[in-house]
Image: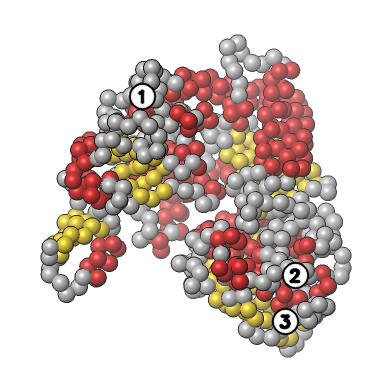
Amino acid sequence: MSVAPKEYNAKNITALEGLEPVRKRPGMYIGGVGSAGLHHLIWEIVDNSVDEAMNGHASEITVTLHKDGETVSVSDNGRGIPVDKHPKTKKSALEMVLTVLHAGGKFEGDNYKTSGGLHGVGASVVNALSKELVAVVKRNGAQYRMAFSRGHATSKLQKLRGTVRGTGTAITFTPDPTIFPRTTFNGETIKQRLETASFLHRGVKVTYVDEVAKTRDTFLHENGIVDYLGKVVKEREARTIHESPFTYRVDDEDRVEVTLQWTESTDEHVRSYVNGIPTGSGGTHENGFRGGVVKAVRNHIDTHSLTPRGVKITHEDIREGLIAIVSIFVAEPQFQGQTKDRLNNSEAHGLVESGVRSAMEQWLNNNPSVADAVIARIVAAARARAASRAASEAVSRKGGSKRTLLPGKLSDCVSGGKGKSELFIVEGDSAGGSAKQGRDRNCQAILPLRGKVLNTESATLKKILDNKEIQDMIASLGCGIGPSINLANLRYDRIILLADADSDGHHITTLLLTFFYRHMPALIADGRLFIAVPPLYRIDIGKETFWAADEEDRERILAKHTGRANPEITRFKGLGEMMPKVLWNTTLDPTNRTLLKVEIDDHLETDRTISDLMGRDASARFRFIMDRAEDASEIDV
């Protein structure tokens, strides 16, 4: 990997535009103003420090979450942002980097071979969205300080007294509460992201200081993504079918690192990165990886005539149970959107595919016992998929000339047309009875679930498909599950989970969400899955009736109507207690109800959360709960 030239000063800084667009439309730059967008501020500053390390200028990065939980400092021992005056603007390079959009040294190829920050956007975006930001730079034996707020400088560049050793940059910022509804950071989220960074950048020491939790963690992984793969396999409680992972690494002009293992899991799990940035939506590098694996395995199977008679092997069968880490570094990454969620570089596909294919073909040929285990795993997946498809194809959309095989307990809707049809998956027969009576029969179908819902997180595919309640859901939906899912056959436009408003109901909803996330993720990606919000309380004040979804909602209503007649409060024990008309008015009526659309903002965080909460590892579940104890009002475990 090449190192930037010794000269790095204001002449290397290029400016393009101001920061007002960032404050007006923050979602365009950080993806939104929710939790993911808030934490994105940290990632942007960390990415800049990582850039220094990637290009050979830094070896240590320290991130501190301060006591208030809202202020973060990121420091590195890199070269330090230049502080001399820019020849055109006559402002210091530091001020330009932090106050002008697209001002940075990354536009000039001589300064960074690869970079992860937003092409120089990151630091200025963080400044624009912070109520306070302070930059401290060490260069040329001196230390400099400059303060900012909401994109503007609030102090001049100050040269502090005394001399200092070394070089580097430290950025401390506090998010702007007028932009973000909540400005408190999650310490565990930061910690996990930093540990991932240490896996992706071998030899870089990353330290995380959490002053809220009073902890200090140091990450240094000399084996890089191989260590990372081991951690992910352990987190997912996956049983591997071969001991040593496949690894591929090339460090030419563009660096590519891949490692993988096949497991007994029923799903595929790939974590991909570009220049250290997670690409949750994949992209050309991830597609190239998948293509390389599939072509290498197919070639091995065909060369050795390993396909059993009557078995058809698909690319989904080959990738089932695969857990992989894909990390590439390219000089000019082209991302889809400012938040770098998906790589678009066309050359990355061929680069990764050809390298992985060649290396894996050699690996399979040189390790016959491993190859035999992998092929046996793939054949088993093909047979299981064929059985699953045969079961799902027994269900057809009602109407037309096809026979309908639907669960007897399903109360279907009259309308067979697309547009407004809804399926409510309801907890329990009693609740299902109220829902059946209260619904709009023309467009609302009801499927009551009986007994305990299966936790599918660690269940085998056979156990899942043998479960009666899951069989009924699959039959009612009509589109199949897993890789063979076909949304064109989905019998309803919306799938709505309806459970009691208490903690037991929340648990049922979580179990159902786990099933849909693991085995029917296409429903979520296509915006078809929703959660109904029934009331937990009925509040009668005088002649008026109010409905509260939870305790916080109840207290808000009571506070708003203080001084009026004494309120009568009724707490529902379950949906079955509600009269059909009440259930219609509060939960089923499209004009009055509240629906929560299930969306995935952060695929890695979602996957980790489900693994921790729903997996077999009780210690992981305990850590998850304790790390988020301060959010107990938001999650009910």
Q: Position of residue 274 (x, y in %)?
A: 69, 50
Q: Where residue 144 is drawn, which disc sits there?
A: 3
Q: CA distance from mark 1 to mark 2?
A: 61 Å
Tell me if residue 464 can be seen.
no
Element under disc 2: loop
Q: Residue at x 35, y 50 (%)?
A: 595
How many other residues sit within 10 Å of disc 3, few (<14), some (14-19) or many (≥20)?
Answer: some
Q: Is residue 23 left or right of residue 121?
A: left
Which callout, 2 or 3, points to the residue nearer the camera? 2
How many other residues sit within 10 Å of disc 1, few (<14), some (14-19) or many (≥20)?
Answer: some
Write down the residue under mark 2. Answer: 15
**Amino acid type for the residue under numbered disc 1:** Lys
Q: Earlier in the sequence, mark 1 or mark 3?
A: 3
Is 31 situated above or below 133? above
Tell me if residue 535 can be seen.
yes
Please report contact status of discs 1 and 2: CB closer than 8 Å, yes or no.
Answer: no
Residue 364 quadrant = top right
Between 109 and 16, the one nearer to me in the picture:
16
Q: Residue furthest top?
A: 309
Residue 557 quadrant = bottom left
**Amino acid type for the residue under numbered disc 3:** Tyr
Q: CA distance from mark 1 to mark 3?
A: 72 Å
Element under disc 3: strand
